[in-house]
């Protein structure tokens, strides 16, 4: 009997009245995958050391196994998929793992290798609702350089920057080319404008960069729409709370509305961003950066 981390151990009870048990293998004691195993039992959530007997078998999550294939091979998952009113989809943890993986440009295979798990299991975790064990979360957090709390969304309502400062931080200015590279990926940025009542306001918008211009959609009469015809500041950043480092880019330039039908059509086709608030947001705003500056915090030897 050989297993990998993330495989499931199933024990078929042969005695009358006994209940079948299954659990996730979260620890290996031999490099070749032979017993014993640390198993997190699905019925108690406890982890115990197991020496499988003749009534046990391994449910393998094979390399490259798709989530649909895994569901087809797992009766419990297949039954859940067929249950009326339940729409399978990625869970919160799986989404956060996938987002962090894409942000770091790390492949699924490499992440699985770092976390010592099957790529098929990681695919299942990212694409379907799942409740991974604490051991699995610890390995994933370590593989991605983040924390279990972050993967669970524990800090989603906290402002960034509450982590411990680096012992020897280095704050450096970034050149315009590095700023443009960081700015060019679509995401969420903040625009500083004078609102309709004359007061300053800073609001987040979903943006993209097309032909060196920062573009976003908004509704006429909204606070971001007040930027049209004025010089504005636009800021985007990323904070790595786990590593206490990050960067910020500030773009300053004139904002204008895009009214030419052909230009609007081209933006609609090329800008890969949709406003999170939803609703009708038909006004395209374009910001042409005149000044582009940025700073990055890293360890002194980074």
Image (cartoon, rainbow, N blue to C red):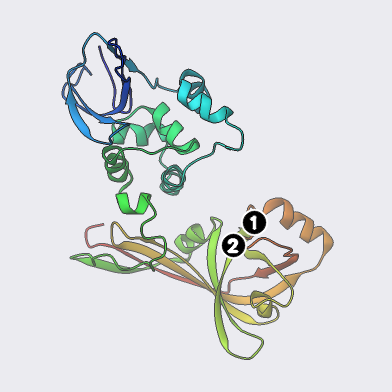
* Quadrant of the rendered image containing residue 63: top left
Q: Quadrant of the N terminus?
A: top left
Q: Which residue is mark 2?
A: 206
Residue 34 image offset from top left, x and y in percent? 20, 16
| Number of other residues with Cα within 10 Å of mark 2, as a class: few under 14, some 14 to 19, many 20 or more | some
Disc tally is 2
Q: Is residue 146 visible?
A: no
Q: Which residue is mark 1?
A: 274
Q: Residue at x 22, y 58 (%)?
A: 301
Q: Residue at x 48, y 59 (%)?
A: 182
Q: Are marks 1 and 2 in contact (CB under 8 Å)?
A: yes
Asked if residue 264 is positioned above or below residue 66 in the image, the reply reads below
Residue 12 image offset from top left, x and y in percent? 31, 14
Q: Is residue 97 left or right of residue 40?
A: right
Residue furthest out toward the bottom: 198
Residue furthest out toward the right: 261
Secondary structure at badge 2 equals strand
Secondary structure at badge 1 equals loop
Residue 101 image offset from top left, x and y in percent? 42, 44
Q: Residue at x 58, y 74 (%)?
A: 290
Q: Quadrant of the C terminus?
A: bottom left
Q: CA distance from mark 1 to mark 2?
A: 7 Å
Which one is in front, 17 or 90?
Answer: 17
Asked if residue 284 is positioned above or below residue 133 in the image, the reply reads below
Which one is in front, 221 or 298?
Answer: 221
* Quadrant of the rendered image containing residue 112: top left
Q: Residue at x 23, y 19 (%)?
A: 33
């Amino acid at each position: 009997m050989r297993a990998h981390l993330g495989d499931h151990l199933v024990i078929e009870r042969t005695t009358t009245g006994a209940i079948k048990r299954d659990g996730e293998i979260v620890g290996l004691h031999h490099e070749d995958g032979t017993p014993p195993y640390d198993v997190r039992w699905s019925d108690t959530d406890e982890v115990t050391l197991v020496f499988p007997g003749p009534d046990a078998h391994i449910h393998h999550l094979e390399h490259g196994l798709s989530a649909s294939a895994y569901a087809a091979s797992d009766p419990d998952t297949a039954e859940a998929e067929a249950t009326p009113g339940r729409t399978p989809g990625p869970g919160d943890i799986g989404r956060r793992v996938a987002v962090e993986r894409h942000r770091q440009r790390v492949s699924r295979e490499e992440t699985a290798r770092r976390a010592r798990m099957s790529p098929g299991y990681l695919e299942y975790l990212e694409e379907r609702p799942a409740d991974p064990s604490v051991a699995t979360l610890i390995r994933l957090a370590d593989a991605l350089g983040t924390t279990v709390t972050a993967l669970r969304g524990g800090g989603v309502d906290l402002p960034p920057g509450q982590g411990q400062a680096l012992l020897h931080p280095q704050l450096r200015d970034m050149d315009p080319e590095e700023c443009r590279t960081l700015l060019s990926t679509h995401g969420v940025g903040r625009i500083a404008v004078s609102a309709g009542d004359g007061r300053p306001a800073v609001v987040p918008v979903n943006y993209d960069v097309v032909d060196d211009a920062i573009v976003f959609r908004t509704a006429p009469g909204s606070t971001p729409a007040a930027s049209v015809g004025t010089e504005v500041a636009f800021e985007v950043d990323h904070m790595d709370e786990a590593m206490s480092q990050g960067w910020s880019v500030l773009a300053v330039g004139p904002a204008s509305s895009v009214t030419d039908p052909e230009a609007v059509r081209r933006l609609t086709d090329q800008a890969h961003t949709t406003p999170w608030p939803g609703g009708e947001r038909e006004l395209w705003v374009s910001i042409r950066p005149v000044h582009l500056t940025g700073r990055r915090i890293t360890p002194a030897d980074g």
